[in-house]
Image: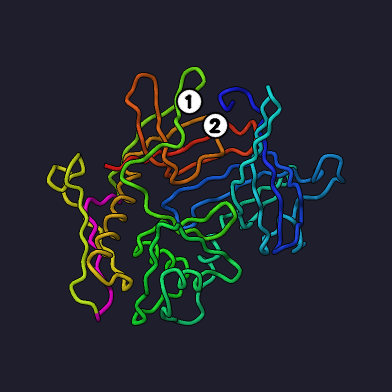
Amino acid sequence: MLAGAPLYSARITSWLGGRLLAATVPIVAGRVTGKATQEVIEELSLTVPRFAAGAPGGDVQDWRPGKNAGHALARYGQTLDVTTIIESVVTGEIWETRIGRYQVKDWDDDDAGTVTVKAESLLARPRDDKLLSLTSPTGTLKSEARRLAPAGMGVSFDPKLVDRPCSPAMSWSRSRIENLQEIADAWPALLRVDAWGQIAFRAPLPEVPKPVVTLRDGEGGTLIAAPRSDSRGGVPNVVVATTGSSTTADVQGVAAITSGPMSINGDYGVVVKEWSSSLLENASQAQAAARTMLDNAARPAQAVPVRIAPDPRLEIDDPVAVIRGDETPLWGWVTAWDLPLTADGGDMRIDVGVSG
């Protein structure tokens, strides 16, 4: 159906706390972008007509916030809820996919009839909400993650993650998001935000992806292009994880790439990344943290920037297969994505990162 000519649109609602400010925000164009390596993974950009009805048959409104702190697009905590809608022109069936919640960061009136709005995923909240006083852990990884989250922000955990106590001898930094990332790295886990805007700790990705979506070209396919790129910058082939606690001696984990073109035994050389945390209390924890950090760093090194027909089902970390012509299928994970929100917004772009 995606390879055909479906009707494609987005529904955007605006909220301030639990109060609905606008059931429909009209848009001329819009995109949601995300990158796994960014601190605040996802961002939203919209172009909105200056004057338009909020819903079909509704009254015309001014969509420039101005000095109105209660306006649907103002930057005083307003949150935009984004859902894509795909309708089959053959059967009339409708599929809705929730994309995420985004906090308005800024707006700009171009004085030519449109307003540009930029917003960030709700991971911006723990980034901006610094701790006002230094504090030490009092519980486990899960309880500390909940305690460090900003007020009113939910936290979810993959059931595969095994909870364990935190060392009370350490102190958290004032940055909530750095503390949450340290918990994720030490667990090890992936720090993400889900479609409902809550913090999500997910289990590390497996060594071998099991594709949930196959992207192919040709008849019935949605793949448009899949050029190749590669980068050495910031890509280690050795990670050394150690404890930052003075009460725990000789805790160290070392993970290295020992085969393939990035092998420490080859011409690539040795590129070492060091990381330390007082949350590591034994060698097995340090080894797991080092291995996960090495995999996360190596995965985007060989990136395949893929252009496809818009597919809102795809998310960061989804395992996919890319098949182009008679080439050998490429398996990997989505490490970045760029999704248009309007029918004339062009192709969807994703990066498929392959480890090893």
Determine which of the numbered discs, if any, sits on residue 241 in the image.
none
Q: Identify the magenta region.
A: 234-247
Amino acid at dot 1: Ile
Viewport quadrant of the N terminus: top right
Give the labeled residue for mark 2: 347
Within-10-Å neighbours for mark 2: few <14, some 14–19, many 20+: some
Give whichever of 72, 216 is nearer the camera: 216
Measured along the vertical axis of the image, is residue 220 above or below residue 206?
above
Give the labeled residue for mark 1: 224
Q: Tell me where residue 81 appears, x and y as whole percent.
A: 66, 51
Colour approach in the figure:
rainbow
Q: Tell me where residue 187 appears, x and y as whole percent.
A: 36, 63
Amino acid at dot 2: Asp
Residue at left offset 71%, top offset 50%:
13
Residue at left offset 51%, top offset 40%:
314
Q: Is residue 235 visible?
A: yes
Q: Check if residue 140 falls in the magenta segment.
A: no
In the rendered structure, the answer to whether residue 223 lies left or right of residue 299 reads: right
Instruction: Indicate the secondary structure of the residue bearing disc 2.
Output: loop
Give whichever of 232, 171 is nearer the camera: 171
Q: Is residue 175 visible?
A: no
Q: Residue 67 appears in which quarter of the rendering?
A: bottom right
Q: Residue 318 appears in which quarter of the rendering?
A: top left
Instruction: Indicate the secondary structure of the residue bearing disc 1.
Output: strand
Q: Tell me where residue 143 appears, x and y as whole percent.
A: 47, 72
Report, in whole angstroms, how far the alpha carbon at label 2 lies from the one at label 1.
Answer: 8 Å
In the rendered structure, the answer to whether residue 222 lies left or right of residue 283 reads: right
Q: Are marks 2 and 1 in contact (CB under 8 Å)?
A: yes
Q: Check if residue 244 falls in the magenta segment.
A: yes
Within-10-Å neighbours for mark 1: few <14, some 14–19, many 20+: some
Measured along the vertical axis of the image, is residue 88 above or below residue 299?
above
